Amino acid sequence: MKEEKMKNPMRDVVIDKVVINMGVGEAGEKLRRAMKVIGLLTEKKSVQTLAKKTIRDFNIRKKLPIGLKVTLRGKDAENFLRKALWVKDFKMPNYSFDSQGNLNFGISDYTEFEGMKYDPDIGIFGMDINVVFRRRGGYRVLRRRIKRAKIPARHKLTREETMQYMREKYNLNILEVE
């Protein structure tokens, strides 16, 4: 008896990282409050993002801190993603997946997370969540120092593969929106 074609474990889809971004728009007290919100949600320290150019109408100068971001990997990323998908009722429109197989969505208010209550001292903050996927093996080729090479097209993720992974692992209901 011949066994069925064995599946290559190095082609499995895995979560590379989850990046949480909060654009506050100004430095000072509002930025500190947003930092507190990210700390409550992720239990990690955030990094400030700086303005790339000066916009006088919005009172923004180049290199002024105007936002925050946190990158989560491994179990932390999976746990946070599960909480964020719970906020969205495990429903996501198909346009949230890009052609490289990444998932991007926003949450308008941090109080929608389970166990979070509104604090008048903090206010209301929303966030953007970006989930980057990759295959289990082969991405070292892109980052190594000696004999670096491009990732071949057959090893890159597609939108459909990522959508299938999210359906299977997180029971995500993907809505077909045109």
Image (cartoon, helix red, strand yellow):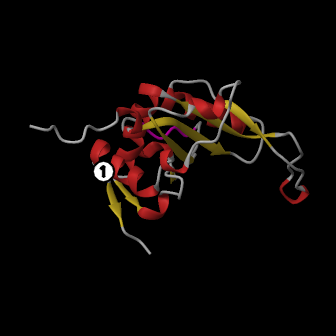
**Among the 4 quarters of the image, the one containing residue 144:** top right
Q: Position of residue 60 (x, y in %)?
A: 85, 49
Residue at x-position 89% and y-position 44%: 62
Relative depth, front residue between 161 and 31:
161
Residue at x-position 38% and y-position 38%: 12
Relative depth, front residue between 120 and 102:
102
Q: Position of residue 64 (x, y in %)?
A: 84, 40
The reply to whether residue 117 is in sight is yes
Q: Position of residue 74 (x, y in %)?
A: 45, 27
95 over 39 or under it: above or below: below
Relative depth, front residue between 86 and 117:
86
Q: Which residue is mark 1?
A: 167
Q: Is residue 155 left or right of residue 175?
A: right
Q: Which residues are magenta?
A: 116-120
**Among the 4 quarters of the image, the one containing residue 67:** top right
Q: Is residue 160 left or right of residue 18?
A: left
